Amino acid sequence: MCVVLVGWAVSHTGGFGAMMSQPSKFVAGAEKSGQFWSVFWPSLTAMVGFWATLALNIPDFTRFARSQRDQVIGQAIGLPLPMALLALMSVIVTSATVVIYGKPIWDPVDLSSRFTGIGVGIALLILTIDTMSCNLAANLVGPAYDFASLAPKKISYKTGGLITAFIALFACPWKILASTNGYIFTWLIGYSALLGPVAGIMLVDYYWLRDTRLDTRELFAERGAYSYNNGWNPAAAIALALGVLPNLPGFLHAAFPGAFADVPTFFNAIYTYAWFAGLAISAIVYALLMRRAAPQMMAAKAA
């Protein structure tokens, strides 16, 4: 579908020249002159946040791989090149919409609705198949397993998926996608502020404390090595809270600008790097709080 869209863009703009000759909005005297970095960093954080979900729950998929080598090769082939090509084609098509319609249209559903004839039906069919085979699978698998794990005897993986789909309706995704600003600055950066600290804790715990080794039997033991304090690790909870807290004022300002208009610029700047700031803070705090436990864990691993 992307290749067809590129072909449509080229044919309707008279070639790549018309698209690529569009001046940048960040050059001197343009609409967004001098604002490149203020747009670039939030956008980068949003894209990291976009992938942060799969970065954390990728074991839901890779655990079915036959070996570590298989999953490394699979991800190396399946992600960088296709995503780079997809990004390039997206930029080309969006640039073409500026020439054709006088404004950038980044939503493929919105763009498809502007086609005529059988092209509309084909485009929407492909988008539906794509959503079911890619987006739905990527976002449904993790929570479906989580719900099933809460009560394995009563909730199957299928039931967990249905619960997830039902709850997803209350998130009102159509409202989130109603504006680019709301989608990027409120949604993507907002939940990256939560997932970044989680990633920081996991990285420190797995690579520094555990040295990439886990006792899978102990993971499922109620009074095992990972049970901590009645199943909760206070150090992780504190690190998570402190990692999220600095990003909270910026999030409130982005989500509710009217009610939180007086948020200091400092917190808005931190929110721009929400995922990175949250990861760094939580990782440092968790490492400091767990430093006493580290020698004991190392000794236990050696034994």
Image (cartoon, rainbow, N blue to C red):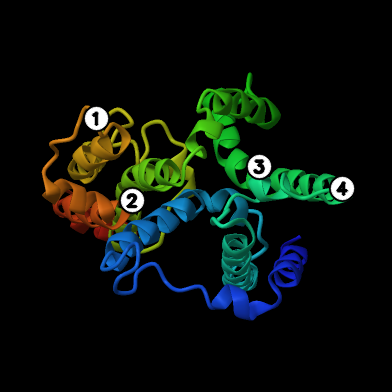
Query: Tags 3 and 4 in contact by the CB under 8 Å rule?
Result: no
Residue to which mark 2 is pinned: 196
Residue to which mark 1 is pinned: 258
Label 3 or label 4, whichever lies nearer to me, is: 4
Of the numbered discs 1 and 4, the one sitting upstream in the chain is 4
- Where residue 28 appears, as percent x and y from the top left, is 29, 74
Q: Which of the numbered marks, if any, corresponds to residue 117? A: 4
Q: Element under label 1?
A: loop
| Quadrant in which the N terminus is drawn | bottom right
Q: Element under label 4?
A: loop
- Where residue 112 appears, as percent x and y from the top left, is 72, 49
Badge 1: residue crowd in 10 Å (few <14, some 14–19, many ≥20): few
Q: Nearer the viewer, residue 46 or 259?
A: 259
In this rendering, would 221 be left or right of 128? left
Seen from this angle, which residue lies furthest top? 154
In this rendering, would 13 be left or right of 87? right
Residue to which mark 3 is pinned: 136
Query: Tags 3 and 1 in contact by the CB under 8 Å rule?
Result: no
In this rendering, would 161 be left or right of 218? right
Q: CA distance from mark 2 to mark 3?
A: 23 Å
- Where residue 221 appears, as percent x and y from the top left, is 44, 35
Q: Element under label 2?
A: helix
Q: Amino acid at mark 2?
A: Gly
Q: Amino acid at mark 3?
A: Leu
